[in-house]
Image (spheres, rainbow, N blue to C red):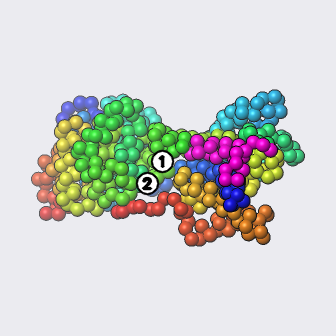
Amino acid sequence: MEILLSRVFAGATSGSIYVLIALCLVIVFRSSSTINFAQGEFALFTTYVTWWLTEHGLNVWLAVLPAIVLGFVMGVVAERVLIRPVKKRDETAVLIVALALFTGLNGLDGWIWGSDDKVFPRMLPSGDDTYVTIAGARLHYDSIAIIAIMILVVVGLTQFFNRTSIGLQMRAVATNPTSAALCGVRVGRVLSLSWGLSAALSALAGALLIPMVPPGQLGLAGMFHVLIFAAAAALLGGLDSIKGAVVGGLSLGIGLALVNGYVGFLGGSMSLTVALVVIVVILVVRPTGLFGARRLERV
Amino acid sequence: MSGRQTMLLEAENITAGYGGATVLHDISVNVAESEVVVVLGANGAGKSTLLSVLSGQLPSTGTLKVDGQTISTVRSDIMLQHGISLVPQGRGTLTALSVLDNLRVGAVSRRDRAGVDQDVDRWFDVFPRLAERRDQIAGTLSGGEQQMLAIARALMSRPRLLLCDEVSLGLAPVIVQGLFRTLREINSESGTALLLVEQNAELALEIASRVYLLEVGHVTTSGSAEKFRDDDSIRAAYLGY
């Protein structure tokens, strides 16, 4: 029982990490119907910036703030300068642009900061004795913190989309950009904002998660696995649903923790394969995911 | 319509089209304050293209003037700020949003929150069927209800001129009659001018005071609705009796 519970805790922790990046993918997909494969690299670049600022003596919680602002600017600029002009001509070419951003940003990281791993300061409390015991299973403070932050982000985003005018405009653009424009929504501005918001959130997520995922240090490959898991989570939940990203991320995290724990041969290096199998199965069986927009339309 | 009073909207020498195909050839139309104008024409005459230009969706050569002032940047949100709002053909429902949110999107150009809430209540009074479905996802509404929603949403910006593109299309006659009655009331109560593009010429002529006849991108005739109702050849061509 303790082992089961501690595996669930571990799964919920990595699941919350997937949720955070999956939400970034969802924000972009909702407004522009693009899967931003460079999302992880946005997060990695800004996390390098955070690290660089801490190397210059800044507290990590302060250092992440300019990185978030930088993330926002990067998102806005990428959408305006790279994505929008290409998308106007060819929808599928956007995929190539995202991949170019992916490799370009990663190369830029290596060029500026080198390829050796950096020790990234932990933002959340951790240590051998920082845990609470629930029914015999240990729940570490950093797990509690990342789950709490994930919940805060989800509540914040939900409020933002449902209660603010710009959130309403984002939902309108997601549904029907032509109609939204006709109602006076500045569609281009909304798209830029979505990309900016998404990249800003991924800057926070990157700094939080880098010490928590293997190898625990900041390296050039730091976001590869997280992005694949997050993409699987987002797909599982339905690419345009916040609720779906949460359910998808948590069930993927917990599911993988249990599979790794109980089905020995699928553990460790095979878990990435499991995530990819999840992606393929969803694409075949239910392309809209669990909570994706089913077409509720009558003529 | 006589004399040189300042028009609410004047479109002068409009030429527009898609890609290489020119649909509108140098046409001019205008609408006075509180006036009801109808544009008649067969399929492909360029009626919807005209409304796309007037609502700022489609670029054109020529000038658009509101209250005699030339609009230098023609864009949907700017035309809305000048009080010109379009009910698009096919209704343009924001299908994944609730009925209430659809109305709110119609008011994004406005800053007066209290006024927006008042207007939501007002159009729910005018269209009780929408009020019953205020929290329902708009994609699940019937065609007639979506048309009501499209009209109410376009009115949420408090336009001085409502452009209506084929509101009767695909709807049962009794529903169309209801919609036209409502449009007429909106015109007489709020003084909102209407520019109707219609295939259902009979109903449109009943509420319009002036008519433009559009044939393959040219205005061929214009004049009072009365004259059109009495003109045998036009009746034969557009009213079918």
Name the side, left or right, on which B196 lies relative to A220.
Answer: left
Identity of the residue drawn at 51% across and 40% down: A160
Name the side, left or right, on which B229 lies relative to A159.
Answer: left
Residue A170 lies within the magenta run: no
Relative depth, front residue between A147 and A116: A147
Residue range of the region highlighted in magenta in the rendering: A128-154
The quarter holding residue A146 reads top right
Name the side, left or right, on which B125 lies relative to A228.
Answer: left
- As helix, strand or loop, the secondary structure at mark 2 comes to loop
Quadrant (top left/top right/bottom left/bottom right) for the N terminus of chain B: top left
The quarter holding residue A268 reads bottom right
Name the side, left or right, on which A104 lies relative to A18.
Answer: right
Which residue is the site of mark 1? A171
Which residue is the site of mark 2? B96
Residue B170: x percent and y percent?
28, 62
Residue A75: x percent and y percent?
64, 42
Relative depth, front residue between A151 and A8: A8
- As helix, strand or loop, the secondary structure at mark 1 comes to helix
